[in-house]
Image (cartoon, grey):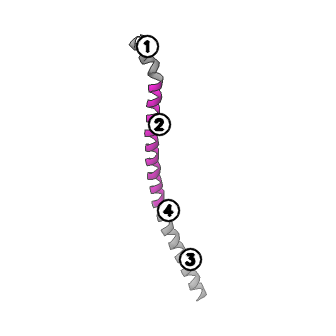
Amino acid sequence: MLICVPLEEAAHAHAPWRQKLSDEDDQQDMTLTNEKVCVEILDQLNEEIKKVRVVIEQIFIKKRGEELTEKL
């Protein structure tokens, strides 16, 4: 059985599915963007942690040096 439907109605009937597919594609694009941003943030945090670690190590070295001086 063949049903004739105006082209506009057919396009309108499929519009929600097309929108859903488009939304899913956009969501995947956002996921990739979010992953890239997260990786960049983690890289920046890693660099900051390295800097803090160096400062803390210097403080420990200074404190140990002061303790050794006091003991002598």
In this rendering, which labeled residue sits more in front, label 4 or label 1?
1
Q: Give amino acid for label 3.
A: Lys
Distance from the alpha carbon under mark 4 to that under mark 2: 32 Å
Above-or-below relation of 5 to 54: above
Q: Can you identify the residue that label 3 sits on?
A: 63
Residue in the image at 44% along x and 26% along y:
18
| Magenta region | 17-46
- Judging depth in this view, the residue of 46 and 56 nearest the camera is 46
Measured as percent of width and height from the top left, residue 69 is found at 56, 85
Any mark on residue 49, and which? 4
How far, Cα to Cα, is label 3 from label 4?
Answer: 21 Å
- Decide whether residue 28 is among the magenta residues: yes
Magenta span: predominant SS is: helix
Camera-nearest label, 3 or 2? 2
Residue matched to label 2: 27
Q: Quadrant of the C terminus?
A: bottom right
Which callout, 4 or 1, points at the residue further toward the start of the chain? 1
Residue 28 lies, in percent from the top left, at 45, 39
